[in-house]
Image (cartoon, grey):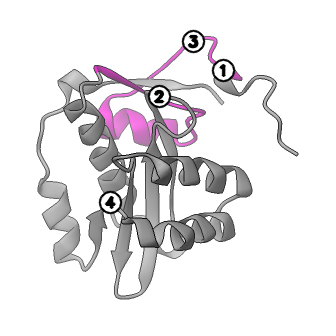
Amino acid sequence: MTDMLVKLYELDINWEFIQEQERNGVIIRKPIGPEKTAVVRWVREHFSELWASETDVALSRTPVSAFIATSAQGLLGFACYDATTLGYFGPTGVEESQRGRGIGKALLLACLLDMKLKGYGYAVIGWAGPKDFYRKSVGAVEIPDSEPGIWKGMITS
């Protein structure tokens, strides 16, 4: 899969999506220290060991470079940045039964706006899966010849 690029300087600083999700019973926020183990475990159980490792990195940063989506049901989704390497968005995921509710887009926007406020001009969406989603949501464009990108030669076992 190729990487994609987002022009953060073109994103409006508008956090209304947080309130929209809250009206639907979903809280988008940064996790706190005592939640680290639970969040990493959830990512491992719902997605993969590799994503759990990257999430661990994002949750170990100060300040944390991740957001979570929660409800009365518990953890619904997560999104990270500066986990694989600086300037990269991802990994991100939403529990399968909760997809289609705008949670993924809210997590994406939260991370990208956080990056913009930290001074990043661009964000790379590493190994982008749903390319049409990223195009429509934030105007992301594919980066030519970016596969396998930073993951070339990565140790996986």
Q: Which residues are magenta?
A: 121-148
Q: CA distance from mark 3 to mark 4?
A: 32 Å
Disc 1/disc 3 C-alpha distance (Å): 10 Å
Residue type at mark 3 is: Pro
Q: Earlier in the sequence, mark 3 or mark 2?
A: 2
- Pointer 2 with pointer 4, Cβ within 8 A: no
Q: Is residue 112 left or right of residue 93?
A: left
Residue where numbered disc 2 is placed: 86
Task: Report which residue position mark 4 lands on.
Answer: 30
Label 2 crowd (10 A; few <14 / some 14-19 / many >=20): few
Q: Write down the quadrant of residue 155 in the picture.
A: top right
Q: Residue at x 33, y 44 (%)?
A: 111
Q: Earlier in the sequence, mark 3 or mark 4?
A: 4
- State the residue at coordinates (59%, 47%): 54
Q: Residues within 10 Å of mark 1 (few under 14, many from 20)?
A: some
Using the numbered discs, state the Cα–Cα distance from disc 1 to disc 2 in whole angstroms: 14 Å
- The residue carrying mark 1 is 149
List x then y, in percent, for residue 4: 48, 25
Q: For the residue marked with disc 4, what is the amino acid? A: Lys
Give the quadrant of the N terminus. Answer: top right
Q: Name the residue beneath numbered marker 3.
A: 144
Q: Amino acid at mark 2?
A: Leu
User: Measured from the top left, where is residue 112 in percent x and y?
Assistant: 31, 38
Label 3 – label 2 distance at C-alpha: 20 Å
| Amino acid identity at mark 1 | Gly
